[in-house]
Amino acid sequence: MTTRTRARRRWLLPIALLPAVVALAVTTPAGSAAGAPASPPPARVAPAAAPVPEVVAPAPVEHATGATHVVRPGETLSHIAVRYGVSTAALAAANGLPDPDLVRDGTTLTIPGAGAGAGAGAGAAPAAGAPAGPVAAGDLPARLQASPTRMAYIPRFDHWAAANGIPADLLKAMTWLESGWQQGRVSSTGAVGIGQLMPDTVDHMEMLIGRDLDPNSAEDNIRMSARYLRLLLGRYGTAEGALAAYYQGAASVDANGTFAETDQYVANVLALVARF
């Protein structure tokens, strides 16, 4: 999809104050709006029957040879690999997947033994609590290093992270887990591109930034992802809170606390930060 058919929404909404650490406006040719709507973009995950309260410690990583996992909407192979402490390449090989970037919702995956194929891809970084050794700082995922197209995004992440006053390594790790930095990825729920942005989130960020942007453009997608992460860091004050809201939706987190899969997502992103 190269064109957008969504009706543009432009309205005035209440201003929410942000902490000083993220209060500086992003410099843009068209300027930037001063505040954020009180109502955040909708959640990307469905509410659980019984809400799970927020926790400090991340959920443990599963390590069981022969275990299985049913792929849920929005999950990527690298996301699942990190959860189980194996590499993306090993997980793909164990299930006969010719393209690790493509996995269908509802597919039952066999999980190879813990640590299988370590260092082979985006899933090589263990989640918190995994028994693998420490990850060297800046040890970029092998799949990233093998892709000149995706490596070329690094300066753009650095630029927009700096423009928004947020940690570049956190932005990179979050979006790597979201999409593997694949701009053409569109989830079953309609989340688009590198940052897996939902349509309402795009509208929200366009209003804050003060100009029309295209989520199908890698540059604009990274820019909006950075701006959204800045908004959430200001709202929640911690990386854990911001990541939870990015994944689950701020309204859902505020109303229900975080769900178990959200806690795992947060742990997985934080485990990847050292690699960027």
Image (cartoon, grey):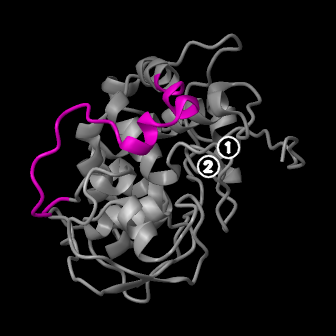
Whether the residues at callouts 2 and 1 have beta carbons within 8 Å, the answer is yes
Residue 65 in the image: x percent, y percent? 24, 83
Amino acid type of the residue tagged 1 in the rendering:
Val
Residue 17 in the image: x percent, y percent? 43, 34
In this view, 11 is above or below 22? below
Is residue 152 located in the magenta-colored stretch of the structure?
yes
Residue 273 in the image: x percent, y percent? 28, 41
In this view, 253 is above or below 177? below
Sequence-earlier tag: 2 or 1: 2
In this view, 124 is above or below 45? above
- Residue extent of the magenta highlight: 128-154
Q: What element carries label 1?
A: helix
> Which residue appears at 57% of the width and 43% of the height?
194
- Magenta region, mostly helix, strand or loop? loop
**Few, some or many C-alpha atoms within 10 Å of disc 2 (few <14, some 14-19, many ≥20)?**
many
Name the disc covering residue 197, or none: 2
Amino acid type of the residue tagged 2 in the rendering:
Leu
> Which residue appears at 43% of the width and 25% of the height?
161
Is residue 40 located in the magenta-colored stretch of the structure?
no
Q: Is mark 2 on a helix, strand or loop?
A: loop
Q: Write down the residue under mark 1.
A: 202
**Few, some or many C-alpha atoms within 10 Å of disc 1 (few <14, some 14-19, many ≥20)?**
many
Image quarter (top left, top right, bottom left or bottom right) of the C terminus: top left
